[in-house]
Amino acid sequence: MISKSPCRPSQADEDVRILRRITPLREWQAPADAGPPFMKIAVLDTETTGFDPQYDELIEIAVAMIVIDDQGRLIAVENLRSGMRQPCRPIEPEISRITGITTEMVEGKRFVPQQIADHLAEADACLAFNVAFDRRHLEELVPEVGAMPWICAMADVGWRGLGFDGRAQGYLLTQAGLFNPVAHRASDDVASLVNLLAHVCGDGRTVMAHALEGAKAPRWRFEASDLPHRLQKDAYRRGYRRSFHGVYHKLVREPDHDAEIAWYRELVGRDPTMVPVDWIDRYRSDWTWEPVKRELEVAHWRR
């Protein structure tokens, strides 16, 4: 149940590309060349009432447990669970248009956070398409997920280098030659994501293999703890964002490490504070970590 080489045109007809419907998870079959089980991963998606994890609420979550071999090939999809919850406030019409979930659909429904925590604890890692969104919302409800490794299918995969254009899940799926006629409910997005992870890229490796490699790769949080106010716009244009604690920061990959230090040094005159972050800490909410307090020598005009 894998797709190969995105819907590229054949030499016979360069004007036609064929899309195939995703494989239903209940019909999943291991590829013929799959190896023994290596990792169990919880593939999840959430729907919420908005973008702010400290104000908006989870209204739906879906989780599929997948088993992969050491080459990132999907051996099995063990189960798919989903649930809904009635939020404290009515669901806004715009959110209903985006998610397909109305206030009436969630009336009287609730999550049991401990059950979610216990289920996710069966996995070696969690995976979402946009971890920066899903993890931060889920962690407000289930704090235990903050101690788990996380894999981001959007940010941990070098999509452009693999021949893909853009980073929207639905668009990537079509470039892999697949489509899902149902969206945007959480369980449907999980099914789409599982199929996308199983796709074999032009280099012969699955998207899952690339995502796992990217998640384990070294990263650093560059903290501009001594950034003068007049240079904040320069840092913002470079991709630095202001944290809950008021410190501008940016996640930096290993290939960009030296160039980023050189840029910061030229701008500020000294190195940024560099904090190694692994796949457990990488996508945490910025109010859950404390910036490094940096002692700087102050030059006085009078000694």
Image (cartoon, rainbow, N blue to C red):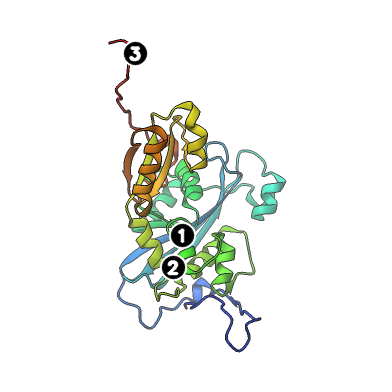
In the shown orientation, is residue 95 left or right of residue 188? right
Q: Amino acid at mark 3?
A: Trp
Secondary structure beneath disc 2?
helix
Answer whether labels 1 and 3 touch (C-beta < 8 Å).
no
Task: Identify whether 6 is placed above or below 215.
Answer: below
Neighbor class of circle 2 (other Cα within 10 Å; few <14, some 14-19, many 20+) is many
Q: Report the disc number at residue 298.
A: none
What is the C-alpha distance between the residues marked 2 and 1? 8 Å
Q: Report the disc number at residue 301.
A: 3
Answer whether labels 2 and 3 touch (C-beta < 8 Å).
no
Answer whether labels 2 and 1 touch (C-beta < 8 Å).
yes
- Residue 222 in percent (x, y) is at 38, 40
Q: Amino acid at mark 2?
A: Val
Secondary structure beneath disc 1?
loop
Identify the residue at horizontal 30%, vertical 68% (top origin): 38
Task: Identify whether 265 is placed above or below 65.
Answer: above
Q: Report the disc number at residue 153.
A: 1
Which residue is identified by label 2?
Answer: 207
Identify the residue at horizontal 62%, vertical 79% (top origin): 17
- Residue 243 in percent (x, y) is at 46, 35
Identify the residue at horizontal 33%, vertical 49% (top origin): 278
Is any part of residue 293 visible from this angle?
A: yes
Which callout, 1 or 3, points at the residue further toward the start of the chain?
1
Q: Amino acid at mark 1?
A: Ala
